[in-house]
Amino acid sequence: MTRQPPSQVTDRTDGSTADASRINRRTLLTTIGVTAGALGIGSSTTAADVQPVTDVPGFSCGKRHFTCGREVAAADGMVSSVDPIASGVAATILRKGGNAVDAAVALQYTLNVTQPHGSGIGGGGFMVIYDAAADEITCVNSRERAPRGAEPDMFLDEDGDEIPFDQRHQSGDAVGVPGTLKGLETARKLYGSRPRQQLIGPAIKLARKGFTVDDFLAEQIAENWWKFNDAAKETFSTASGEPLGAGDRLVNADLADTLALIKRGGTDPFYEGEIAADLVETVRELGGTMTTDDMADYDITLDDPVRKDWYDVEIVGQPLPSSGPSVVAMALKMLEFCGIENHELRSPEMYHLVAEAITLAWADRMEYMGDPEFADVPIDGLLDDDYLAKRAGEIRMGDSVAANGCADPGVPPGVDSSGELSDSGGESGATTHFSVVDKHGNAVSYTSTIEQFMGSGKMVPGRGFMLNNELTDFDAEPGGPNEVQPWKRPLSSMSPTMVLNDGVPEFTAGSPGGWTIVSVTAQTLLYRYVYGLDPLESVVEPAIYTYHCSDVEWDSGVPERARETTAEWGHDWDDEASTLGNVQVIDIGEDELIGAADPNRDGQAVGFDRGGCR
Ligand code: GLU
């Protein structure tokens, strides 16, 4: 979601008569810098706001077959990611005949190089795949696991107090056994059509030859310098030892060598060979318990998606241990039961209902959710229509359920009584979400992370990649369903989601941002489906973020009157606006794919049209 609302979406609660659901799409695109020509199917227009991508061999936005922009349309393939280089690499794979999974795998390998602050082989993620030929959805779950030596109280000090976050997120105990590489290679083997060598090749070249550091990466290097180990400092600095700035070139020869080992040997060198040994040594030096056996035994799971009907479509996404799509579905279903469509976009009533539904769903998340391999989660009860209708019935216009502190969890079917709320806190904005759709209708919605920006801040010396600090997603306090346990996966908020119409994907969405992910993903779907906004409009429409207690963060563009009115109803709004999420979406029409990338970072959608005779 962006800080900059389209200028023509005026503040209707302040007296304007504009109907935001009828925003002129081309005016909007012009406002945020995309040329109208970039919308034409089959065109190869370079959009005005799009940075020239010179680092991808065989790709340029001006080249035939490709259309680049914040929002573009194309017929034969679409990529939407936060990084123009990675989007370009993925689009090139589509042009060479690769499918959506091939392109997504190449994209993630590339992000490891170009956006080391957000994701990589030192982390984990969730890849939701629609296989068009089989008409099936599978979730490749590469969430990190706690090492077998992890203890429920490992984030408490000797007095039983929580170790401060800034301290614990850099410790070896915070590092989970990484899953991303196994996820990528499993997805490629099961659903891809191209050899690993072809998909990892562009990332190796980029790491070896270097690429230009953009503003966002420069900012992340500067802001996280304090927690970098020597290896990270060396990689992210100039020859004179200064942090790399925007416009500098980042060469990461160690990472190129690591990826070259993977290119030749697949996952083995990483999980069982020399890279595993170095990774474990680094974690143990930081005080962690990870062993080479933990690395060798790591494997992904293939999960059936969580599914929930909503109006006349179905919301589908990664199930637990991500709470994301389940909580998105719970909140949206409550909003359907509340009849949110009867309230105007940006009205106080709309924001109130959104905040209330998310608050109630969040209270249930905190009470009941954890890794289903370890915790007995009443997920069917939480998604049950009668339960959600009853929960929605707790929402009253003019009075917040969290007005006096925190909302209580409900008692879904399958549960006798409620216990204490647990709280692991946390939102950061790290992580990355991207989507790819190919000409066969295969679709990928993938959220990938190393947790905080730059993860733990520690790079494996000589290997060029950052280690995650994902285990801080566990509750520091033992006792709840999300307490630390050996070999358990921490509860996530990542929400790689698809919306199905008649069983077929027609929209994909997701975002980084820790706990805020759920709020912004839910609102993107709300704005697209209930308020009828176009894909990019649904991404830039100002969102709010709340959880089971009453603070509300907001994108600029949320009208002052809506904030003032709902404050009287018990909502505790932040004084200043925030920048929430970074949403990438693809809309899948019968003859046209529309990709949209959130303008609040450098995101870029790239469409592919094969041209020629059809
Ligand atoms: N670790 C977080 C999660 O799995 C994502 C981190 C972020 O997006 O900031 O929910």
Image: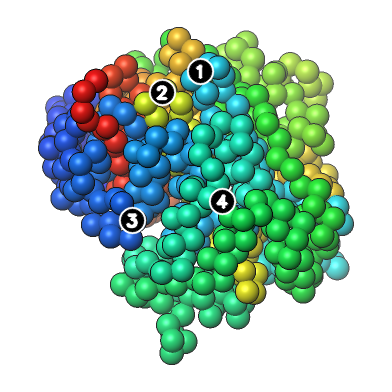
Asked if the residues shown at circle 3 and circle 4 are in contact, with their CB atoms under 8 angstroms apart, the answer is no
Q: Nearer the viewer, mark 4 or mark 1?
A: 1
Judge whether 448 appears above or below 589 on screen: below
- First of labels 2, 3 by sequence position: 3
The residue that appears at 35% across and 44% down in the rendered structure is: 92
In this rendering, position of residue 67 left or right of residue 515: left
Asked which secondary structure carries label 2, the reply is loop
- First of labels 4, 1 by sequence position: 1
Q: Is mark 1 within 8 Å of ligand 1?
A: no
- First of labels 3, 1 by sequence position: 3
Q: Is mark 4 within 8 Å of ligand 1?
A: yes
What residue would you read off at disc 4? Answer: 449
Visible residue check, residue 389: yes
Q: CA distance from mark 4 to mark 1?
A: 29 Å
In this rendering, position of residue 578 left or right of residue 492: left
In this rendering, position of residue 230 left or right of residue 607: right
Asked which secondary structure carries label 3, the reply is loop
Q: Amino acid at mark 2?
A: His
Q: CA distance from mark 3 to mark 1?
A: 31 Å
Q: CA distance from mark 2 to mark 1?
A: 8 Å
Query: Between residues 287 and 592, which one lies in front from this camera angle?
Result: 592
What residue would you read off at disc 3? Answer: 57
Residue 476 rendering spot, x and y as whole percentages:
75, 54
What residue would you read off at disc 2? Answer: 440
What residue would you read off at disc 1? Answer: 133
Q: Amino acid at mark 1?
A: Ala
Quadrant in which the N terminus is drawn: top left
